[in-house]
Amino acid sequence: MCPQLSPCHPGGAPHVVAARPEQGWNLLCDGTIHFDDTGELHPDGSVVPPHRPPTAHLTPAA
């Protein structure tokens, strides 16, 4: 991880150290990239796929 990033607070939740809302992502202090679609990319290369709520209950607009 880049040494210029602010470290996470001990025992605290990871916080945003770089925000790119125009691109749809935020970099957290632990090196995780969190995407607006709820997916994540971790520093070790592991991926959390987007976990969007089901939309089957929605009806199309008339």
Image: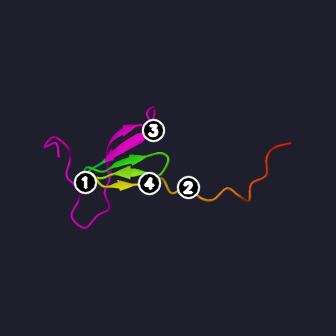
On the image, the x and y values in percent for residue 20 come to: 39, 35
Secondary structure predominantly adopted by residues drawn in magenta = loop
For image coordinates 32% across by 62% down, the residue present is: 13
For image coordinates 40% across by 41% down, the residue present is: 25
Name the foreground residue: 58 vs 15.
58
Answer whether residue 8 is magenta in the image: yes
Name the foreground residue: 30 vs 15.
30
- Label 2 packing within 10 angstroms: few (<14), some (14-19), many (20+): few
The Cα–Cα distance between marks 1 and 4, rounded to whole angstroms, is: 18 Å
Q: Give the range drawn in magenta.
A: 1-27
**Residue 8 falls in image quadrant:** bottom left
The residue pinned by badge 2 equals 52
Nearer the camera: disc 3 or disc 2:
2
The Cα–Cα distance between marks 1 and 2, rounded to whole angstroms, is: 23 Å
Answer whether residue 10 is magenta in the image: yes
| Residue 42 as seen in the image, left or right of residue 25 | left
The Cα–Cα distance between marks 4 and 3, rounded to whole angstroms, is: 15 Å
Disc marking residue 24: 3
The residue pinned by badge 1 equals 30
Of the residues shown, which amino acid type is indicated by label 2? Arg
The residue pinned by badge 4 equals 49
For image coordinates 44% across by 54% down, the residue present is: 49
Labelled pair 4, 2 in contact (Cβ < 8 Å)? no
Q: Label 1, secondary structure: give it.
A: loop
